[in-house]
Structure formats: C-alpha cells, structure tokens
Amino acid sequence: MAKIRPVGDRVVVKPAAKEEVTKSGIVIPDTAKEKPQEGTVVAVGSGRLLDNGERAALEVREGDRVLFAKYSGTEFKLDGEEYLVLKESDILAVLS
Amino acid sequence: MAKIRPVGDRVVVKPAAKEEVTKSGIVIPDTAKEKPQEGTVVAVGSGRLLDNGERAALEVREGDRVLFAKYSGTEFKLDGEEYLVLKESDILAVLS
Amino acid sequence: MAKIRPVGDRVVVKPAAKEEVTKSGIVIPDTAKEKPQEGTVVAVGSGRLLDNGERAALEVREGDRVLFAKYSGTEFKLDGEEYLVLKESDILAVLS
Amino acid sequence: MAKIRPVGDRVVVKPAAKEEVTKSGIVIPDTAKEKPQEGTVVAVGSGRLLDNGERAALEVREGDRVLFAKYSGTEFKLDGEEYLVLKESDILAVLS
Amino acid sequence: MAKIRPVGDRVVVKPAAKEEVTKSGIVIPDTAKEKPQEGTVVAVGSGRLLDNGERAALEVREGDRVLFAKYSGTEFKLDGEEYLVLKESDILAVLS
Amino acid sequence: MAKIRPVGDRVVVKPAAKEEVTKSGIVIPDTAKEKPQEGTVVAVGSGRLLDNGERAALEVREGDRVLFAKYSGTEFKLDGEEYLVLKESDILAVLS
Amino acid sequence: MAKIRPVGDRVVVKPAAKEEVTKSGIVIPDTAKEKPQEGTVVAVGSGRLLDNGERAALEVREGDRVLFAKYSGTEFKLDGEEYLVLKESDILAVLS
C-alpha cells in the first residue's frame, strides 16, 4: 500500500473479515479477558529510534498475517477500506 | 513557514479543512474510539536530543501530509490561520 | 509449532491440563494471592531489542515446562487448541 | 538579565503583555484546550545533564521570542517585574 | 533443588518455619508497617539482562539465609513443600 | 557548614528570613500557583551517580543564593537553626 | 555488624534513641511535613548495579551518623535490637 507510510515503530494493519478468520483455523474465545484480533500488515514504519540515533528495523513485514491486541491502535478509512495504525509492540505474533 | 521554529522533536501542523479530507480519500469513522485527524506539516524542530548529545533528525518533513491523533498538541493562531504544535510521536503516518 | 511466531520477547505457551499438573508434583495452593500456572512453551520470539539494535535471545526454549503468573498474557485458539501469548518476563521459572 | 541564572535545562521567560501579542500576529483562541502563551527568554541554564556527564546546550537563546504552555513553570517577581522559570521542554516554539 | 530454574533475576526461596526464625535470633515486630520474612534461597536465575546483552550474576546464592519483603513474590508447592518465586530486588539482606 | 554532608545530588539550604527577601528585590506573588522560596546553599552533595559509575558535580555551590520550589525537601533543625535538604533538581535558579 | 549483609544499594541502620538525638544538636520540628530521623549505619550493600554490569560503591559507610526520611525502609529485630533496612537513596545526609 504505497499511499500510507507509518511513522517510527508503527505499522498499518487491515483487520481480517470474519470469514477469513474461520479459514485460518484461529478462533478467538468469546470469554477471553483480552481478545486478540487477526489482520494483515499492509505498511511498516522505518523502525524504532535507538539511543545511538539509528533505527531498528521492524520484525513484522508487509504481507504478514498477524495477531494483535483487540482494542489497540487507531482506526481510519482509506478509499472505503478500514485500517488500523498500531505500534509494533501491539503485535503479538505472526501466523504462517 | 519561516515565522515559527518548533523546539526539539516538535512539529507545526496546519489541520486540513473538511473539503480537503474528502479529496484525499481518507474518511475518519464517526464511531472510532480515538479518531485521527489530517493535516500538513509546515515546520519541523531540530530533532530529539539523544543520550550522546546529538540530535536525531525528525522523520516527517515540511510539506508532508500527515495523520495525527485528534486531541494531541496545542492550538494557536498566526496571521489569522489556525495551527497545532505536536510532538513527532503524535504523528501516526505520512500520506502520499 | 511452525504455525505461529511470537514477536519480540514473547512466547506462546500451551497451558497444562489439570491431570498433568498433578503428575509433575506441582500443586498450586487455592489460597495463594497470585497463583502461578503451569504450561509448555511451544514457540519463542526473536528476543528483546537492545539499545544497540541487537536482540537478546530468550532464556526459555521450545519444549520447556514453565510456571507463569496466572492472569498474564492473551488467550487464543488454533486448530481447536487453547494457547497463550506471554512476555518472557511473565515466565517465573522453568521446571525440569 | 545578569541577576538570575536558571539551573540545568531551565529558562527564565518574561511573559508578553497583551498589546505585544497583538502586534506579533499571534492570537491564542479562547476555546483552546491547552492555550500557549507568548514571552521573551531572558536567561538560559547550562543545559541538560547527559548520561556521559556532559551538558547539552539549550536550543533556545536569550532574546528569543517563544510560545510556551500556559500553566507551566513557576512565577516570581524581580525588581517589580514578573517572570517565569520554565523547563526548556515547556517551550513549544521560537517565533521569528 | 535441581527441579526448578528461576528465569532472569528471580530466585526461589523456601520460607522459614516459625521455630527456625526464633533460633536465628531474628524477631519481626508485630507492629512493623512492612514486615520482612526469613527464608533460604534454593535456586537462583541466570541474572538480570543488561543493555549490552550480557547477564549480571545475582548477588544472592543457593543456600543463603535471607530477609525478604513479606508479601512479595508468588507461592507454589512442589512435592508437598511450599516455595516462593521472588525477584532478587525483593531480597533485603543476607544473614550470616 | 562542616557538620552535615548531603548524599548524592542533594543540597542543604538555609531558607531566607522575610526581611532578607525584601532586600534582594525578589518578591513572591501571593497568588502564584506554585510559589518559589529563597535561601542560601550551605552544603552540597557529591553529585548524581552516572551510568558509567562516575559522579556529575552539582551546578550549585556552597554560598549560592537560590530560588527553590516552596514545598520541596525535608526540614530539620541543627543547633537551633532551621534547614532544608533538597534535591538539586528542586533548585530553580541561582541569584547573583 | 557481621551478621547481616544488605543486598545491592541497601544499608542497615540502627535508629538513634531519643536522648542521642538531643546530644547531637539535631532537633526534628514536630510540624515538619516529612520528618527525617537520625541513626547509625551498621552495614552497607555491595552497591547499585550499573548498566555495564559493575557495581557503584555506596557513598555512606559503616559507622556513619545519618539523617533519613522517617517512614522509609523495613524494620526488623536482631538479638533484641531494632534495625531498619533502607535504600541508600532514602539517606538524606551524613552528620559529622
């Protein structure tokens, strides 16, 4: 997604629609205290600024299928599609 | 905008008028928990002071079209126009 | 478990079923203020990002039998099985 | 102002009188959540102490016209004039 | 105790029985705001992870008789015996 | 004052009597949110411990006339005189 | 006091009895917001762990007469005597 570039250690994620979740085999229990959500990374930032002034590249990549904490990040719409801007630290795991 | 120079890791942003938002294709959902806002960077500071005494240049540049967290920063008026002073960390993403 | 890769200093743990706990000899007192739980590490992240930009490998390994703070982490289901994503710092000890 | 030397990363600011604000073109909206105030830097400290024991010189200079967060700092009077002692981080921007 | 290995800067302590406390000469006043407790270190972790990626060995050793803050740590039972997992920073002093 | 040596980045200050304040020209407005107080430094500590194990010498010196935040520090009496032990960071400015 | 060795940047202090306080000339005002207390250091820890893995030796020494914040630390009794375990940062000043 060339239209948006997250700043620092942020990523843009497209949340998965309900049907997709079923296909991947991941099911989030309704009773979970803190429910994770599934989505696809569509853009990653330049990384976290280190104390020596360099940037540490993010661990997640464009196209990664990820689990993230449900109520984290900021929602926005671009060309009619819903996205989330998250910090990489809100990403729990990469699915493969 | 030569008349104002933000200090440290701050930037000055001119918030987008409503019509502009529509043109760029970004629509902010009314129901979003934390709604981002769109604007244009008009001045950037000298960067964050690192532990070694150097400054890390900001990642956003003058002229960048940006998404930022809605209630962040400090509003002021200069020559009749409204601006915001924000920390770079309040900038979520650069649009292109 | 090749299907999930935790991010950073996170691990994925399969919580032990009640019968297993009995076998290992560990019994968690009902009256404990903060009760630990037992489980098996099924996947580990790439480690904590250090200030110099390197990653410090995790101390726990895939297959480790661990004690962890009971209400920590995030639950999810994969192929019908329940798992938890935890930070390594939520792991109290490795049993052997 | 030779009579006062701020400590560390502090600065002494003489708040602008109302008429001056009008002249500079800056108008602070009455409805702003966090209103900035305008003033002139009259003394600067030796800078922030870095981890290596050196001092990082302040970015603002004596004579700078500045915007600062309105309720920050500590007021005092010297020879009948009102001043504020602020941390440099309370200074939002330098006007020129 | 070969059966348990604490993670990072944690230690496993076997709390002292009441009679033992009397023998050692330590008496905890009933009126103390924050009462310490006595016990024996039975296992120590690999140490705190430093910023350079190395581990700083713990200061307490297996077999040390220690005073620790009373309500710190997490209780568990192993082979019918009660233990606590604590951070080394919860250990106040070593008795000798 | 040879009888007391503050620890680390602390200083001992003798608060100014009311008459002295008038003489120096400093007047603290009654309506100030956070009122500073005037005093004289009578002893300084060895300085803040840096990450490399060295000490950074304090910026204020014995004999300095200082402004400090009014309700900071700890009061004590020595030989019938009242003093305050403050952290150097509670000192706002040095008067000269 | 060879029987107790504080951990890290902790010290063991024997609080002064009331008569002793009078002799030394220090009097704590009854109306002080945060009253300091007087005592004698009887044991010191190995020092604070630095980021490079070394220990910074404590500034206070065995035998030092010290002022410390009144409600800090943890009380315990050893051989019928009352002591306190404190962090060095709770020690305000050394008296001489």
Image (cartoon, coloured by chain):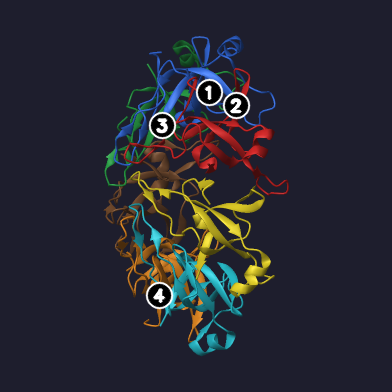
Chain colours: A red, B blue, C yellow, D green, E cyan, F brown, G orange
The Cα atoms of the two marked residues, 1 and 3, are separated by 16 Å
According to the image, label 4 marks what residue? E61
Count of numbered marks: 4
The Cα atoms of the two marked residues, 4 and 1, are separated by 53 Å
Q: Is residue F59 visible?
A: yes
The Cα atoms of the two marked residues, 2 and 3, are separated by 32 Å
According to the image, label 3 marks what residue? A46
Residue type indicated by callout 2 = Lys
Q: Nearer the viewer, mark 2 or mark 3?
A: 3
Q: Secondary structure at mark 2?
A: loop
**Chain that bears disc 4:** E
Front-lying residue, G89 or C50: C50
Q: Do the residues under discs 1 and 2 have CB atoms within 8 angstroms? A: no
The Cα atoms of the two marked residues, 4 and 3, are separated by 44 Å
Residue name at image x 67 percent, y 39 percent: A22
Q: Secondary structure at mark 3?
A: loop
Q: Do tags 1 and 3 sit on the same chain?
A: no
Q: Is residue D59 above or below residue C1?
A: above
Q: Do tags 4 and 1 sit on the same chain?
A: no
The numbered mark at residue B67 is: 1
Q: Do the residues under discs 2 and 3 have CB atoms within 8 angstroms? A: no
The numbered mark at residue G54 is: none
**Chain that bears disc 2:** D
Residue E41 is situated, as x and y percent measured from the top left of the image, at 47, 76
Residue type indicated by callout 4 = Arg
Residue type indicated by callout 1 = Leu
Residue D17 is situated, as x and y percent measured from the top left of the image, at 48, 20
Q: Residues within 10 Å of mark 4 (few under 14, many from 20)?
A: some
The Cα atoms of the two marked residues, 4 and 2, are separated by 56 Å
Q: Secondary structure at mark 4?
A: loop
